[in-house]
């Protein structure tokens, strides 16, 4: 069964058909989903989803672009949610320099705090890094992130940077971008990354793969991603699904 390791089904893009969509997953071969917190509000709605749907697990974290909303009180609340049943990761957290706000110093402070939270509660981290390759890597090395473990979500850098994360034992979230024609460096990285370090993800409702690029993304599109990975690795689509499910179970569920 397909394991979608990163989605945002609490997003308003699903307000019209969330129940219908999620209950259709099993018949389409989608076994489990991790709904990932990106703000304090989305962490709250993620907690609702994991209570409502047995196959949905949660991650508690604040996206770098949303860290301006954090203070000591709200961060204490976030810390408290990480021991909730079916919360399996801290994230998404990291650095995003694509947008100007909040400033890098704010992002870095809360990135470090969330990394230390993951260490404390013994959960893997889900790392978001956009236009911030060097700073993300430097911080993770300084924080001994290899001792924490986790996944580089929506990996978009070179195979040379992939090597650095492999040395730390990290996994790589691969989604719809791998199907884009202009994703040359990502395809080279996926060819290089061992299959036992790859996770399937959607980032729903974002980053739908070809042939549905530009539309709302859902886990139902993951066969397109698995097929592209299969082509790059020279294995079958079924093997990709099986290997990535096993990887996600190992990282997030300790199986």
Image (tube, rainbow, N blue to C red):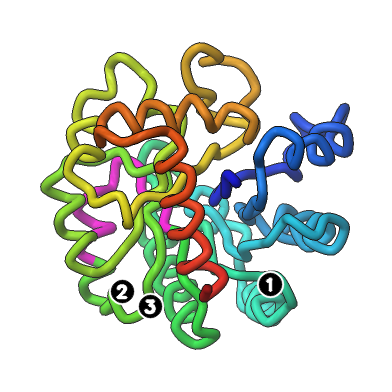
Question: Considering only vertical position in the picture, is 145 above or below 225?
Answer: below
Q: Position of residue 220 (x, y in %)?
A: 64, 30
Q: Is 87 on the left-hand or right-hand side of 175?
A: right
Question: Considering only vertical position in the picture, is 240 above or below 123?
Answer: above
Q: Which mark is residue 145?
A: 2
Q: Secondary structure at mark 1?
A: helix
Q: Which mark is residue 148?
A: 3
Q: Which residue is mark 1?
A: 74
Give yes or no for contact between labels 2 and 3 (Cβ–Cβ under 8 Å). Answer: yes
Q: Position of residue 51 (x, y in %)?
A: 84, 63
Q: Which mark is residue 89?
A: none
- What residue is shown at x 70% (from left), y 70% (from top)? 86
Q: Which residues are magenta?
A: 127-138
Give yes or no for contact between labels 2 and 1 (Cβ–Cβ under 8 Å). Answer: no
- What residue is shown at x 83% (from left), y 36% (from top)? 18
Crowding near the residue tagged with mark 2, few <14, some 14–19, many ≥20 C-alpha atoms within 10 Å: many
Q: Is residue 110 magenta?
A: no
Q: Compare residues 182 and 43 and report the one nearer the observer.
A: 182
Label 3, label 1: how far apart the Cα atoms are: 23 Å
Task: Locate residue 107: give its quadrant.
Answer: bottom left
Label 2, label 3: how far apart the Cα atoms are: 5 Å
Q: Earlier in the sequence, mark 3 or mark 1?
A: 1
Q: Secondary structure at mark 3?
A: loop
Q: Compare residues 236 and 232 and report the one nearer the observer.
A: 236
Crowding near the residue tagged with mark 3, few <14, some 14–19, many ≥20 C-alpha atoms within 10 Å: many
Q: Compare residues 158 and 101 and report the one nearer the observer.
A: 158
């Amino acid at each position: 069964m397909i394991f979608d390791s990163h989605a945002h089904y609490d997003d308003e893009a699903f307000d019209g058909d969330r129940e219908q969509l999620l209950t259709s997953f099993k018949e389409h071969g989608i076994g489990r989903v991790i709904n990932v917190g990106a703000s304090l509000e989305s962490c709250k709605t993620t907690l609702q989803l994991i209570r409502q749907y047995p196959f949905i697990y949660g991650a508690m974290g604040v996206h770098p672009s949303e860290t301006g909303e954090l203070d000591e009180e709200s961060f204490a609340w976030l810390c408290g949610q990480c021991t909730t049943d079916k919360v399996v990761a801290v994230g998404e957290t990291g650095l995003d320099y694509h947008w100007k706000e909040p400033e890098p110093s704010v992002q870095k402070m809360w990135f470090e705090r969330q990394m230390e939270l993951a260490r404390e509660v013994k959960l893997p981290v889900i790392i978001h890094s956009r236009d911030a390759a060097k700073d993300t890597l430097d911080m993770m090395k300084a924080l001994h992130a290899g001792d924490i473990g986790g996944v580089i979500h929506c990996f978009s850098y070179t195979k040379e940077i992939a090597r650095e994360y492999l040395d730390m034992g990290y996994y790589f979230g691969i989604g719809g971008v791998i199907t884009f024609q202009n994703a040359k460096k990502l395809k080279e990285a996926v060819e290089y990354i061992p299959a036992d370090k790859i996770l399937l993800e959607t980032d729903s409702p974002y980053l739908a793969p070809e042939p549905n690029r530009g539309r709302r993304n859902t886990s139902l599109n993951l066969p397109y991603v698995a097929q592209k990975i299969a082509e790059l690795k020279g294995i079958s689509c079924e093997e990709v699904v099986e290997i990535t499910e096993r990887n996600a179970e190992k990282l997030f569920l300790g199986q």
